[in-house]
Image: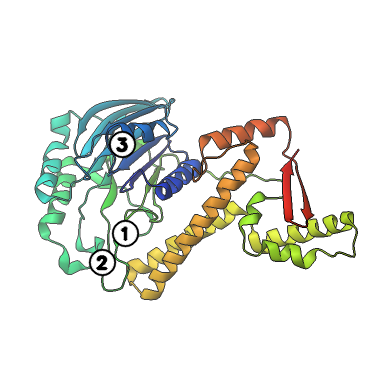
Amino acid sequence: MTLLVWNCQGAASKELNCILKDLIKRNSPSILGLLEPRVSGSHADDICKKMGYSNWLRVEAVGFSGGIWIFWKEDIHLEIVYSHPQFVLARVEGNNRIPWFLSIVYGSPNATLRKRLWQDLTKENLNIAGPWLSIGDYNSVSSEQEVSSTGRVASNRSAGLTDWMFNQGLLDLGYIGSRFTWVRGLSTNTFKVARLDREVCTINWRQMFPEATVIHLPIIQSDHAPLLVKLNGHKNNKSKGHFRFQAAWLTHKDFQKVIEQEWQNKLTLGNNVDKLAKSLSKWNSSTFGNINKRKRKLIARIKGVQDCLNNQPRHRLLKLETKLKKELDTVLEQEELMWFQKSREEWIVSGDRNTKFYHASAMVKRSRKKLELSWQITENGLEVWSN
């Protein structure tokens, strides 16, 4: 089982939904928690219905502050025990294990309201009798080591969290990835980071899931890092595909140059097509590359830059981070085109990347026969069509 919890700071923007859909596609979380969605009412319901989960619950945001959305798959037996403006408590069963409790938290940035969180989210108040995992944005740190500007940490801001953890017998699960989960500022003068998001659990929960691993994913399209929890360790899924013309090549700035350089009027049409196919194959390997690999590489580079920024903010690194995020957005657009090509449908909703429809349609088509594309070069340029 995998859990993904993210303070997305707005669930309505096209850019954020692209990243979110990619996170869901790559990690397939059984339980998904979104914090501070900044959307409410019927608009929020419409977004939730498109997330691809059969079950979901919303804790309404107060204006533009707060809000918790939780989604879970059909094969997960999850019962909502209690909902609160700052947390949702659920009871989870499955996999022949004893039931355990899960709280998804959004701690208020207001100190007075956050004090209510420590008072209300307790075993005694909620009758939590069993293993317990709590995860989310607590808007608090446990020590000066969890912020970049140590002089700005008020003792009461960390005392509330640490006292609550001690009184409830909760352990920090640790993490893989960046030390900080929140970042703000685009210059060295304004740049600051902190670990506001975390995962804590009771001892018996840790004993139940001894291989559970927490990963701080790169910070993209939000000030916060998504928190990924893998209860049963890592799984590597590898797949191989066959070479064919990719419509996404048309989006690359150098594609037209390859056509102009390789096409020779003195050759026959058949020879030109064969020659161009070989050249495009080499160009795809050397220049365009595998879309999924480029996406993973960009995300890894963004993570590396953010790790460096956590230690020492530099103007050059901030510019590089912005550049890499723009490149990632281009790759996600190319991935959308790739899946649309595979689905062979006649329509596409602009910007709706990596949807469940495209993947399902592509797999159905693939089960019948492999996609075949024909193409030719005319006086008006390259023309592509499907058989």
- What residue is pinned by disc 2? 148
For marks 1 and 3, give the one nearer the viewer.
Answer: 3
First reached walking from the N terminus: tag 1 or tag 3: 3
Across and down, in percent, residue 314 comes to: 35, 74
Name the residue carrying label 1. 180
Residue 244 can be seen, yes or no: no
Q: Where residue 13 appears, x then y in whole percent?
A: 38, 47
Along the line of sight, which residue is nearer the eye, 279 or 40? 40
Locate residue 108, reporting x and y percent: 18, 47
> x%, y% of residue 176?
39, 54
Q: Given this view, does label 2 or label 3 mark the residue nearer the observer?
A: 3
- Asked if 185 appears above or below 244 in the picture, the reply is below
Q: Are marks 1 and 2 in contact (CB under 8 Å)?
A: yes
Give the residue type that dot 2 points to: Ser
Tag 2: Cα neighbours inside 10 Å, few (<14), some, or many (≥20)? Answer: many
Residue 69, which numbered label? 3
Q: Nearer the viewer, residue 147 or 255?
A: 255
- State the quadrant of the N terminus: top left
Q: CA distance from mark 1 to mark 3?
A: 23 Å
Q: Quadrant of residue 80?
A: top left
> Residue at the location (42% across, 50% down)?
15
- SS for dot 1: loop
Comparing 20 with 147, the one in front is 20
Q: Describe the element under mark 2 as helix, strand or loop.
A: loop
Q: Quadrant of the C terminus?
A: top right
Q: What amino acid is found at the position of numbered circle 3 in the picture?
A: Trp
Q: Quadrant of residue 50?
A: top left
Residue visible at 36% across and 43% down in the picture:
12
Amino acid type assigned to the residue bearing label 1 in the image: Phe
Earlier-in-chain disc, 2 versus 3: 3
Sequence-first tag of 1 and 2 = 2
